[in-house]
Image (cartoon, rainbow, N blue to C red):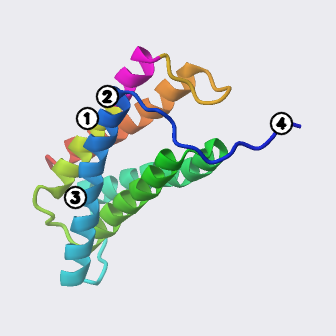
Amino acid sequence: MTPQKTWHIAKWPALAWLETVSKLVALGIGLETAVTTLLANPTFALPTGAGLAQIILLSLLSLGLVAAIFDRLADREIIAMGFVILNNLGHWGMVLAMASTTNLGNAVWQFAGLMLLGDLVKIWFIKANNFTVRDYPQRTLYVLTGVYLVGYTLILLLELF
C-alpha cells in the first residue's frame, strides 16, 4: 500500500502561471457577471437556440471541473486545489448568469475567450515541460484540454448568433 501524499505547494513554471492568470481573470469575470446579473434579475428563464446550446456546453465543461476536484484531492497540491474551486465557482456562476438573461454584454466573449487562451497556454505548458499527472499518459492531458478548447471555441462561435 502506497502512503498517502501530504498537502504541499508545487513549484510551477512560468507557463503554468500564465495559464493561471489568464483563467483567473476569466473566473473573476464569471463571478462578477453572476453576482451582478443575479442581483438585477434573480429569476431564471432558459434561452432557446444558440443561447441554450451555450448553457449546455458550459454546463458540461463545468461538470468536468467538478470531477477535477477529486483529481486535485488525489494530488494534494494546495494551489491547484484552490484554483479548481475558483474554476468551479466562475464556471457555474456564468451558467447561472446565462440562464437568467440573454444580454450579458461582452461577458461571454471575455470569459470564454480568456479560458480558451488559458487552455492554449496549458497545451504549450504540457509540451514544453513534458508535464504529466501521476501515471496518466501525456496524451490524456492533451485530450482533456482539447475538449475544453473545443467547448470554449463553440461557445464563442455560438455568441455570433
Q: For the point 56% across and 44% down, which residue is it?
A: 77
In which quadrant will I find the N terminus? top right
Asked if the residue under mark 4 is in contact with the one under mark 2, i.e. CB atoms within 8 Å, the reply is: no
Identify which residue, 133 or 37, lies in the foreground. 133
Chain-order first, disc 3 or disc 4: 4
Q: CA distance from mark 2 to mark 4?
A: 33 Å
The reply to whether residue 60 is visible in this rendering is: no
The answer to whether marks 1 and 2 mark residues whose Cβ atoms lie closer than 8 Å is yes
Find disc 3 in the rendering and name its residue: 29
Q: Is residue 63 magenta?
A: no
* Residue 126 colored in magenta in the image: yes
Which amino acid, by three-letter code, is at mark 1?
Leu
Helix, strand, or loop for circle 2? helix
In the image, what residue occupies the spot 25% across and 74% down? 35
Side of 32 where 3 appears, left or right: right
Mark 4, Cα crowd under 10 Å, few <14 / some 14-19 / many 20+, is: few
Q: Position of residue 136 (x, y in %)?
A: 64, 26
Q: Which residues fall within the magenta stretch?
A: 121-129
Residue extending furthest toward the left: 105
* Location of mark 1 (residue): 117
How far apart are the two marked residues, 1 and 4, measured between alpha carbons?
37 Å
Dot 4 corresponds to which residue?
2
- The quarter of the displayed image where residue 99 is located: bottom left
Which residue corresponds to mark 2? 121
Q: Nearer the viewer, residue 106 or 7?
A: 7
